[in-house]
Image: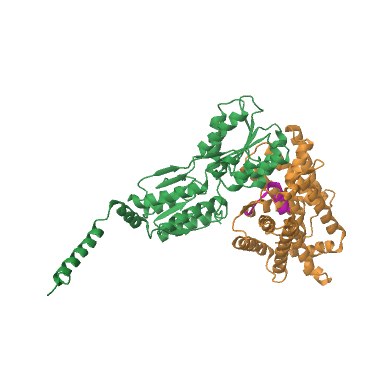
Chain colours: A orange, B green
Amino acid sequence: MKNTNMKSLLRTHIISQETAVLLAALLLALLFAMTLDAFATWGNMMTLLRSVSVLGILALGMIPVVIVRGIDLSQVGISMVSSAIVVKCIVLGFPLPLCLLVGLALALAMGAINSLLVDRLQIPVLFVTLTTVFIFVGLARITVLPSMIINLPPGKLELTVLSMNWHGVPVPMLVFAACALFMHLFLAHTTPGRFLYAYGDNAETARLYGMPIRSILFMAYMSSALLAFVAGVLMVSGTAIVDLKTVSSTLIFDVILVVIIGGASFSGARGSVASVLAGLLLMGVLLNAMTIMDINSQLQNMIKGAVLLAVLIVDKCLNPLDEESARQSI
Amino acid sequence: MKTKKNNPLRKLLLGGMMLSLTAGTVAYATPRDQMRLDFDKAVKGKTVAWVPITLGNPIGDMWTAAMRQNFEKYGVKFLVRDPNFSTSAQLQAVTNLINQKPDVLIVQNANVTLLTKELKRAMDNGIYVVQVNLLSNQPTDAYVGVDYVDVGRQIARDIVKECGGGKSSGKVAFVQGEATATDSIDQLKGLMEVFKQDKSIKLVSTQSAKWDSNLANQITATTLQQHPDLCATYGSWGIMQQGAAQAVKTAGLQGKVKVYASSDGPRSDCDLVEQKLFHKILSFRADIQGEQVSNAVISLLQSGNKPGSKHMTILSNNYWVTGKQERNYCYDLPK
C-alpha cells in the first residue's frame, strides 16, 4: 500500500525523477561533507564542476537525441576526431581560428551523416551510430591521423587558455553553463524544441500533424555533433594532447549514465537540461568522493553500474512502456 | 714456327689453373666471409611476425619502424598486425600467425595471461617467441624489455631524495595506468619497497587513469584540492601523466609539485621536461628497445636452439631526463 502511494506520488510529479536524483546528490554531498576532509570547500566544488564539465556538455548534446528516442554512440568518436583534426591543423601551422572552423565543419558533417542514415535509410539508430563511429575514426586514421596521439606544439598552446580559471571559476564550467542555458532556451522555449518532444512522444502523430520530421531528427543529431566538438576542444585545452584511444573508453557510457539518471528515458519525450544537471551533479559528487577516498577503478565501475541499474529499475516502475513506445523504443 | 705464346697446350694448362683457383676460392672462403655467408643463410628469407597491443601511438610506431629497418636490411620478411587495443583481436591475430608458421613471433602482451597458451603452441610448432616489455606467465625464447619494478624503485628513490626526510609534506600521488596492468603493478611494487624505508613519505593516492590523460588530469586536480601541499606525483606512463602535469599547472603549483613519469621517450615527454611541466622522466627509449628486439630475433635465428629450449632476457637501460641537456634520451618518430 505504502509502495503504491509512493509510486502514485512520483507519477503525479510531486517528486519528479530529476528532483529525486537532485535530492540524492545533495544528501550524498552532505554525507561526504561530514565525513571527508576538504570535500565541502569552494576549491573542491570548483574542481568537481570542472571535472564534470566535459561530461556535462556531451550529455547536453545527447539529450535532444534521447528525447527523439535515439542514441548517439558515435558522439565521443565525433568529439575526438574533430578535435584531433583541430590539433593536426595547428601542428601543420595553420591559424587557430581556421583550424577550429575546419574541426567544427567536420563534426557537423559527421552529425549530418548520422541524421541522414537514421532518417532517410531508416536504419535503427543503435546500429547507425555504432557503425559510423568506426567509419569516422577509421577514415581519419587512414587519411590524416596515422597517429592516435597528437600533442599541441610547444609554441602553440593558445587553446590551453580554455582550461584556466576566470575570476576563480573554471572556464570549462562557464562554457558548460553557457551551453546549458542555450539548450534550455532551445528545448523549453522554441517551437523546434517543443517539436522534439512531440516527435519523441509519438512520431507518427507528429508526422500527421505536419511537423517537419526530417528537420527534427537533423536538429537532434546536429546538436549532439556540435556539443561533441565543443567538448573535444575543451578536452584538448585541459591536457594539450588529443588521444583517439578515448573513443574506446567508457566515456560514452558515462554520458548515457548522466542522461538516464537525470530522468530522460529511451522511450522518448522525456528529459531536459534540468535532468542533465541533476544526473551530472550525482555523478560528479560520486566521482569526486571516490577519488578522494582513493577507491580502486574496478569498485568505482561497479558503483557506477549499480547506480545506473537502480535508476533504470526505478525508471521502469515509474514509466512503464505502452505498446507503441515499446515498439519504437531503442 | 709456333711461338710459346700461341701454344695450345700452354693455354689449356693456364685455363685449368685458373678454374681450379676459382673453385678453391669458393670452397675455402676466409673466416670473415664465412661469417656473413652463415649469417645470410640463417637469416635471409626468414619470416618474422610482430603483434603489438596497438599501432598509432609513439611507442608502437617506433618499435615497428626500428624492427622494419633492421629486418629489411637483412632480407627478412616482416609481418605486422595491429589489434588496435582489442585483446580479442590480438589473440586472433596471434592464432592466425601461428598457423602461417613464421620463423619468429614477437608479441607485446596486453596482460600476463591472454596469450600464454598460444605462445606455448607457437614454440611447440617450431616458432621462436620474443616478448616485448611485458612478460606473460609463459616464459619464451626471449624477453626484451624494462624491469618495471626497478623503474619504480629508481623513481621512488629520487622522490625520497627530494620529498623525504621531513624536507616537505612527504605526500606523493601515484597515477596508475590500469590497476590490473602488470607494468603499473610492478612500478607500484618497486615504489612501495622504497617508500617503506622512509616514514615521512605518505602515498596519498593510487588512482587509475586508464592510460587516459584526461582522467589523469581530473584525478590530479581532485588530489591537489585535497592535498595542496602534495610534494610529488608519479605517473606510470608519460603521455598519460601529461594530463596530471597540466592539472598541476592549472592549480598554480607548477614547480612546487614535482611531476615524475616513467617514459618510453617520445619527444613530447622531453618537451614537457624542458617546459618545466615535468620535473623528471625516466626514459628507456623505444627506438633503442626496437633495436634490442631485432638483435634478439637475429640471435635466435642463428642460435640453432630448438624453440622453447632456452630463455634469454635482455633488459633495457633507463635514462633520466631532467632538462634540455638530456633531450637525446627522447626519440623522434621517422617521417
Could you tell me which residue is drawn at 53 percent across and 55 percent down?
B88
Coordinates of residue B45 in the picture (x, y in percent): 38, 60
Residue sitting at the far front: B1
Q: Is residue A243 magenta?
A: yes
- Whether residue B12 sits left or right of residue B138 in the image: it is left
Residue sitting at the far bottom: B1
Could you tell me which residue is drawn at 75 percent across and 50 percent down?
A56
> Where is the C terminus of chain A found, in terms of image quarters?
bottom right
**Residue nearer the viewer, A283 or B29:** B29
**Residue nearer the viewer, A106 or A192:** A106
Please report the bounds of the magenta region as a residue range: A231-244
Coordinates of residue A129 in the picture (x, y in percent): 67, 62
How many numbered marks appear? Answer: 0
Residue B48 visible, this orientation: no
- Whether residue A136 sits left or right of residue B13 in the image: it is right
Coordinates of residue B231 in the picture (x, y in percent): 66, 32
Residue B32 visible, this orientation: yes
Coordinates of residue B255 in the picture (x, y in percent): 68, 35
- Whether residue A87 sits left or right of residue A219 in the image: it is left
Give the overall secondary structure of the magenta segment. helix
**Residue nearer the viewer, B211 or B319:** B319
- Quadrant position of residue A222: bottom right
Depicted A205 relative to depicted A168: above or below: below
- Quadrant position of residue A91: bottom right
